[in-house]
Amino acid sequence: MKLFSAKICSVLTCGVFAGMVSAYAQSVPVVAGHYPAGAEGIKGASLPPPGFYFRDYSIFYSADMFRDIPVDFEIDAYVNAPRLIWMTDKKIFGAQYGMDLIVPFAYMDWSVGGLDGSYSGIGDIQIEPLLLSWHFKQFDLAAGYAVWAPTGDYAPARPDLISKGFWSHMVTLGGTWYPDGEKTWAMSLLNRYEFCHEQKYTHTDPGQVFTAEWGLSKSLCNGLDVGFIGYYQQQVTKDSGPAATDKRDRKIGVGPEISVFCPKLVLFTSIRYAHEFEAVERPEGDLITLTLTKPF
């Protein structure tokens, strides 16, 4: 779910009246990837112990620059993505086995070249039937496999915020390293790779997408962590089909994060900010993510 990207022609058609959409639809390129880079932060490759968890992502995004297009551009968006996680006591290859489900909702408004519009609704659902978690003395490792289903209301005449109109598969592998014996320092790297299927409106196969998210953190006291996070997302193969282009979009973001655990509420809260730069065929803006995690 590439929450905040839209390639040139997709953005240029935003806000166009319904009678004009068909004239533009044939030229709208398919945007690769579902996964929202920056969704995870410090210790992003560490999964919780066995149990049921509810995690809620509140994502705020704002951008007034779109690389490579010579028109005025602005987009503001809010995405709420509830996630249910179940980590079981069962073991596979020595790892705890789990699964999860994410159902995103979004509101956005945009303005491009004097045209504007707004949209709210459900997005493409992620189903992850395989989560594997290993915990060692100084390392945590995680792996997974997920499917993104085109459940959202896709339309070629608006930014591809949460609805892509195609299926995709995603594999995940990452780890967290604790350099000191007390585990007050943590370094994490989470890698994801997406394989996209044919977009049903354009009959075009989007390229494959690689995403890396990293974090460096320090525990200042019991339940309080601070650190820095970053992400890099790159389309690594070209599109194929009638609407294919030679462009491979990319974005990079970095910023701070703070994470707090409240024992009284048994609630984990984290907030992080990322500023984007060196974007290619993407909006370039600012991302704020508030994450709440509640075990049951």
Image (tube, rainbow, N blue to C red):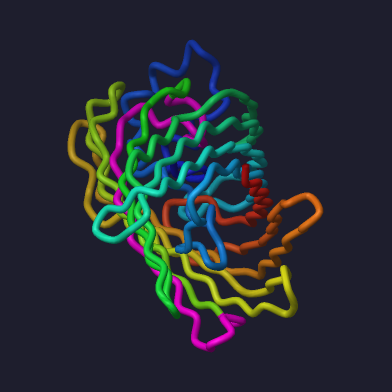
Coordinates of residue 285 in the picture (x, y in percent): 61, 55
Image location (x, y in percent) of residue 242: 20, 31
**Is residue 249 visible to the viewer in this orientation of the structure?**
yes
Residue 234 at least partly seen? no
Image side of residue 69 versus residue 247, left or right: right
User: For residue 72: magenta?
Assistant: no
Pick whichever, 255 or 295, lies toward us: 295
Where is residue 54 drawn, in percent x and y?
A: 60, 41
* Magenta-colored span: 156-185
- Please provide percent x and percent y for residue 174: 37, 65
- Which residue is drawn at the image coordinates 54% and 53% (left, top)? 39
Q: Is residue 193 left or right of residue 186?
A: left
Going 70% across and 58% down the picture, which residue do you hit? Answer: 271
Residue drawn at 40 percent across, 49 percent down:
89
Residue nearest the observer in this picture, 102 or 296: 296
Does 175 lie within the magenta span? yes
Q: Quadrant of the N terminus?
A: top left
Quarter of the rendering occupied by the C terminus: top right
Q: Is residue 67 above or below residue 253?
A: above
> Residue lying farthest right?
264
Total marks in image: 0
Main SS, magenta region, reads: loop
- In screen coordinates, is 132 left or right of 218? left
Q: Quadrant of residue 196?
A: top left
Q: Residue furthest top?
A: 19
